[in-house]
Image: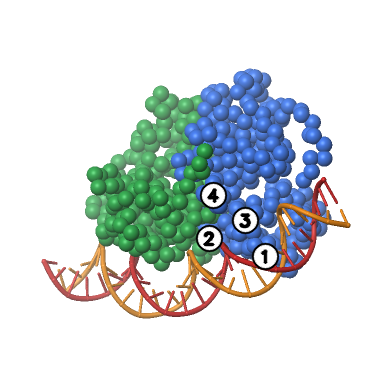
Chain colours: A green, B blue, C orange, D red
Amino acid sequence: MTNRHRSPPRDPFPHFVETVLPAPSAPALAPPLRAIAQTVALEGGQTFRIERGADRFVFIASGAAKLVALASARREQVVAFHFAGDLLWIASPPAHDYLLAALAGTTLVTFPATAFISIVESDAAVMKALFERMQQALLRSREKSVSLGRKTAQERIAGFLATMADRIGTGDALGPQVDLPMSRRDIADSLGLTIETVSRQFSELRAAQLIETHGRSHVRVCNLAGLADRAGHARAPL
Amino acid sequence: MTNRHRSPPRDPFPHFVETVLPAPSAPALAPPLRAIAQTVALEGGQTFRIERGADRFVFIASGAAKLVALASARREQVVAFHFAGDLLWIASPPAHDYLLAALAGTTLVTFPATAFISIVESDAAVMKALFERMQQALLRSREKSVSLGRKTAQERIAGFLATMADRIGTGDALGPQVDLPMSRRDIADSLGLTIETVSRQFSELRAAQLIETHGRSHVRVCNLAGLADRAGHARAPL
DNA sequence: CGGACGATTGATCATTGTCAACCATCGTGG
DNA sequence: CCACGATGGTTGACAATGATCAATCGTCCG
């Protein structure tokens, strides 16, 4: 978790261009987008806040972040985790405030949403790519609703670990390994649980030989099938 | 809830066109879209199912529907309610099956997602409109995560009623009125509660003079501010 | 009017939250 | 390099919110 050396202040904008913009569209769109882009370097714990009514697109060039809704002073809901390469859309609707918080050193490229759209709207390929990212976000959010609404603590944790193994895990003969960039509190705030319950479920999964943990953040999934089993991802029989 | 007379089998496609397609785009896009459109008339309780990997866009021409994720045999999560005029996108991801169930007589116009997109992708206005509906869906889904993850039963019910008053309420001097098209079970499955808890919270809100109920589905909101209060929609102070 | 389904209310139980103490990890400074 | 301190994580005892089980009631339909 150390910033062992100030990360090179390389401009993250090219990374955004090659990750988000389809190659044929890039030359035409990159310059106007650069003009409205705002690059932000956050250290772990720092937040990026959205003003009311000023939706933004945020590209995560490096690092990891949580998108948080503030339900009230002592109640936070982590709406999504995002990692390098993700493009997300943030707005602050009437009900709650939202903010993006870095889980570690993180570099963002951000755009005002309306200006961004008016630049890319004429480019079918970009709009389509954007649309697909939106679909993915919606799908993940719906799956989160299932988890929060109808799953037990253990199912939520198992599902969370399986998802993280998939998204940020590193393959391995003995099963995927993950270095979780988020704290137990972040996990709890994401799954609608308390840190104590998260901790207990980690212990149970460890006792059941499904995972091994080393230190605070390292998890090895010993039995991915068993984990998916406990996640309650029951697909209805045809 | 009666089908007092077989609803006139008027073609719902024009309704889709004028609701979803911006006027200038309609003439060019309506014919090819009609060619891939599939109209479905559902009676209350009937379902529209998505095959694996065959995403669809669904326009609700009339009626009301719930988008349900099947967590397992006895556990359903209502991911969203949708009403006439809504356009939604449905996919069946690996984890759970999804289906759309009519809450009453409902007419749908549905399209295979990929074919739909390849037809409209070249039209910036339509893509933008589509994109905005997607943003709205994502926002609602995020708000639902907050509700499911960090709110008490009473806050969820209060928030639900406030939202319904906003979306399908009819104005009135004495406060908005709503005819809920969904059952207590649907509400429970949407809010991650049981029907008993839903019922008890309705009773409490009634006792607190915030709502009045007549019959199973009619609700009058006597005190919208008080309801919003109990919804825990705390916005962090600037 | 009667029957069936859905809604309400009550009694009890269990999962998870709360409060509290202890322990481990990691970063710092001696 | 090790010891220490602080932060974050784990574990335990207890309490509370909401689930479960059960009975009754109301509503809507034939």
Residue type pointed to by label 1: Arg
Q: Which residue is mark 1?
A: B200
**Which of the chains bears the disc numbered 1?**
B
Q: Quadrant of residue B56?
A: top right
Return the disc, 1 or 3, that comes first in the chain's sequence: 3
- Evaluate if marks 4 and 1 touch, with contact meaning CB atoms under 8 Å apart: no
Return the disc, 4 or 2, that comes first in the chain's sequence: 4
* Cα separation between marks 4 and 1: 25 Å
Residue type pointed to by label 4: Ala
Counting other residues with Cα less than 10 Å from the Cα at mark 2, is it few (<14), some (14-19), or many (20 or more)? many
Residue at (69, 36) in percent of width and height: B42
**Image position of A5 (left or right of A43):** left
Counting other residues with Cα less than 10 Å from the Cα at mark 4, is it few (<14), some (14-19), or many (20 or more)? few
Q: Which residue is mark 4?
A: B73
From the top left corner, tell me how far across and down residue A63 is, in percent.
34, 48
Label 1: state its secondary structure: helix
From the top left corner, tell me how far across and down residue C1 is, in percent.
88, 57
